[in-house]
Amino acid sequence: MRLSLVPRGGDIQSVGGERGPVTVKRAPQRDHVVAASETVTLVLGEDSPLPESAADVEDLVRRLRGHVAQLGARTASGTPVLLRAQRLCSDSVPEGYMPSRVYLVDLAEATQELVTHVERGDPGSLRPERRRRSWKPRINMLRGAVFAVALACLVWAASVPRT
């Protein structure tokens, strides 16, 4: 069985006529920070109601855990914000109406802190540590130094007596 080389899926759009060339375009990927912010707004927004069923809570918790995993890849390991969010993600959803909603709000708040941490680009973010570089002279300084050495050599050579 041969597999088609043309990608399939809902995120692909064909551009072109029936007889003309067909170009395949992928829809742009959403930013993880924006998606996480939208999910957090679903939970913490002033106009958003509390989830009605346990399945709704489970769905929101699953989405928030996914956002924490995606944002955690963009954050340096060991930062307190990431550790708190990961600790909440590793906990199971408590039984009961109020404890599950409190857990959901705590997880949303931890995700919001992680989002702001990634947006700010804190020093603990996934940036390589900058080493202190040695002083690098500018090119004109190098040219001047070479000229000065060459001039000194010329003066020295002219002052040496001929034999």
Image (cartoon, rainbow, N blue to C red):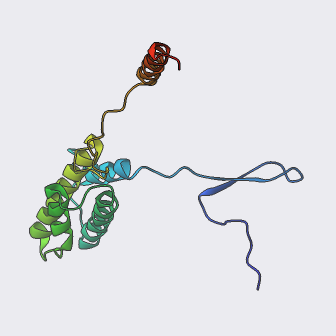
Q: Is residue 154 above or below residue 65?
A: above
Question: Going by the picture, which residue comes out furthest to the front?
Answer: 163
Left or right relative to 69: residue 141? right
Residue 55: give x, y in percent of width and height: 28, 72
Left or right relative to 76: residue 97? left
Q: How many marks?
A: 0
Residue 43: give x, y in percent of width and height: 23, 54
Residue 82: give x, y in percent of width and height: 20, 59
The residue nearer to you, when weighing 36 against 54, is 36
Question: Going by the picture, which residue comes out furthest to the right?
Answer: 19
Q: Quadrant of residue 120?
A: top left
Q: Residue at x 16, y 63 (%)?
A: 83
Q: Residue at x 33, y 49 (%)?
A: 38
Left or right relative to 102: residue 7? right
Residue 85: give x, y in percent of width and height: 19, 62
The residue nearer to you, when weighing 31 against 63, is 31
The residue nearer to you, when weighing 34 against 80, is 80
